[in-house]
Amino acid sequence: MSAITLIDYDAGNLASLEGALDRLGLAYVRAASPDQAAATGPIVLPGVGHFEAAQRSLRERGWWSSLPTLVAEGRPLLGICLGLQLLAEGSEEAPRASGLSLIPGVVRRLGPGVKVPNMGWCQVRQGSAHPALPDPDGAWLYFVHSYALEPSADTVYLADHGRPFAAVEARGKVLGFQPHPEKSGPAGLGLLQSALAWMGALPMPSEAPCN
């Protein structure tokens, strides 16, 4: 059975994400290295902390070289928070460290003139339509970040903190959430379910996703 692969590289709070997937009744496995990944199904790259430290950890575990190959082979990939930023070409937080370049753009520091990090609830609005995600209709999602991608043609949802920034990005089968959907209440849980369902996630045996 297809299962969600959660990348475990000591740079993501997997407990809250696993709790959300349990509530949705979705099958998942933790994978510290690519050989532990499920054979099929979406891959989720969570992340908190510093861009370069996360990149180094992913390199050490073999994920950095494997992820572009898996995406090229058709595996869906979802990045969350720092996980989204790692999908980009690079970040001002670590100018010498490259990103995975699965989503165009460079991650830039928020501001000026606003409190950083941006910690709390921000209202999101639709940028471009995407089959995985409905119009958010002004939903409030929970953010914890100091850097973000600037809006582009790949931006599905936007939010504002001193300037507009990309809250959700999409390129092919690659999606990225700057907010933490697993910490964003019913709205975030619904968006996470919609994204993973579009990516082909299946419920656990004898379980059904919540409505």
Image (cartoon, rainbow, N blue to C red):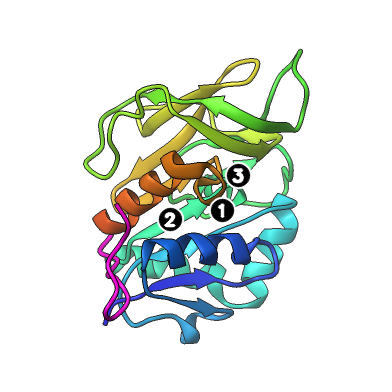
Q: Amino acid at mark 1?
A: Gly
The total of numbered circles placed on residues is 3
Q: Are marks 2 and 1 in contact (CB under 8 Å)?
A: yes
Q: Which residues are magenta?
A: 199-211
Q: Residue at x 55, y 40 (%)?
A: 179
Going from N to C along the chain, the mark reached first, 3 or 2, is 2
Give the camera-side residue of 20 and 133.
20
Q: Amino acid at mark 2?
A: Leu
Q: Are marks 1 and 3 in contact (CB under 8 Å)?
A: no
Dot 2 alpha-carbon crowd within 10 angstroms: few under 14, some 14 to 19, many 20 or more: many
Q: Amino acid at mark 3?
A: Gly
Residue with the most extreme left position: 131
Residue 135, quarter of picture: top left
Q: Is residue 8 visible?
A: yes
Instruction: Give the residue number, with chain letter if any, for mark 2.
Output: 78
Residue with the most extreme top position: 113
Q: Residue at x 36, y 68 (%)?
A: 26
Instruction: Give the residue number, with chain letter if any, for mark 3.
Output: 90
Secondary structure of the residue carrying numbered label 2: strand
Residue 13, quarter of picture: bottom right
Instruction: Give the residue number, with chain letter if any, for mark 1.
Output: 83
Q: Are marks 3 and 2 in contact (CB under 8 Å)?
A: no
Dot 1 alpha-carbon crowd within 10 angstroms: few under 14, some 14 to 19, many 20 or more: many
